[in-house]
Image (cartoon, rainbow, N blue to C red):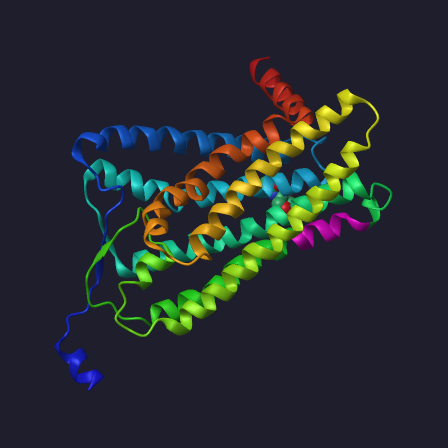
Amino acid sequence: MASREQGNQTFITEFTLLGFGNPPELQTQLFLLFLVIYIATVVGNMLIVVLVLSDQRLRSPMYVFLGNLSLLETFYTSTILPRLLASLLSGDRAIAVHGCIVQFYFFASLVGSECCLLSAMSYDRYLAICRPLHYAARMSASFCLRLVAGCWISGFVSIALIVFLMSQLTFCGPREIDHFFCDFTPVIKLSCSDSRPMELVTFTLSSLFTLPPFLLTLASYICIISTILQIPSALGRQKAFSTCSSHLTGVTIFYGTLIIVYLLPRTETMRALNKVFSVFYTVLTPLANPLIYSLRNKEVKGALRKAIGKLFV
Ligand SMILES: *[C@@H]1O[C@H](CO)[C@@H](O)[C@H](O)[C@H]1NC(C)=O
């Protein structure tokens, strides 16, 4: 019976991404806003990659992580913003089904890798601040390399499973995706196949990628903060605290919005807010991270000053 039904159905090969509803009078403003954000994100992150790779003093694991995070975030926003900008500019909101799945694959893999990398970074800070005597032994160059490689690989491998399941689905309409990129839930909602098995796999994987890193980060910070409180000088305390608090804010916003969007049950209010929360982790996190992690850092600032000096001499 299912096959007879399928015989009558026309399968969809294209979706329409509704974006932000695209009211014509807002289109230009939205385009300019996202264009500025995109340029700032790419320039900020690439600057850090170049500094980390070129400056001999930025060789410690912390900067290896930072360089990789910035590289990752450049790719990450590039899976979403150029497509959004093109559709705001041209008004063409159509996207092929396989294009949609490819976008989801790269986007989701990079989210997974980023979660992993952020927790590696907080583990690194935990060792440096709370276990300074063991730092060199535990965070060796080879361990750091394995952590970084493991993070990149685990994201791309685990999402390949979801995308494989996703490519087995059929879509027979409606074709409108009420979102600004091809995210998992809005796409799955349009499928006319049974999507429960893959929803289960996805729920499990997204729990694995968000909750343990989040808890690990939280635990590291609890320990970091209690160590900072023991610093005798008020000035030193304040300084250590200011870097940590911006890390903590950035990480909380990233994991918090991911958990809200992917793990919490989908009530009506949540669905309306979904797009807003998605802007946080897709657009604002990559924009803010270079500022949060690097440009407030003295060594990075020093390297930047040196590089600019060289450029003009
Ligand atoms: C990323 O990590 C690898 C492996 O540790 C390192 O060799 C490379 O320099 C890092 N990349 C950047 C841009 O920092």
Quadrant showing the C terminus: top right
Q: Is residue 266 above or below residue 301?
A: below
Quadrant showing the N terminus: bottom left
* Image location (x, y in percent) of residue 255: 53, 47
What range of the chain is rendered magenta? 138-147
Ligand 1 occupies quarter: top right
Count of residue discs: 0
* Image location (x, y in percent) of residue 246: 60, 32
Q: Is residue 216 above or below residue 307?
A: below
Residue 146 falls in image quadrant:
bottom right
Residue 40 is one of the magenta-drawn residues: no
Q: Is residue 96 left or right of residue 240?
A: left
Residue 55 falls in image quadrant:
top right
- Residue sitting at 69 percent across and 42 percent down? 221
- Residue sitting at 61 percent across and 15 percent down? 309
Front residue of 26 and 76 = 26
Front residue of 30 and 81 = 30
What main secondary structure does the magenta stretch of the protein show?
helix
Q: Is residue 280 above or below residue 216?
A: above
* Image location (x, y in percent) of residue 24: 17, 34
Front residue of 126 and 231 = 231
The residue furthest right is 133
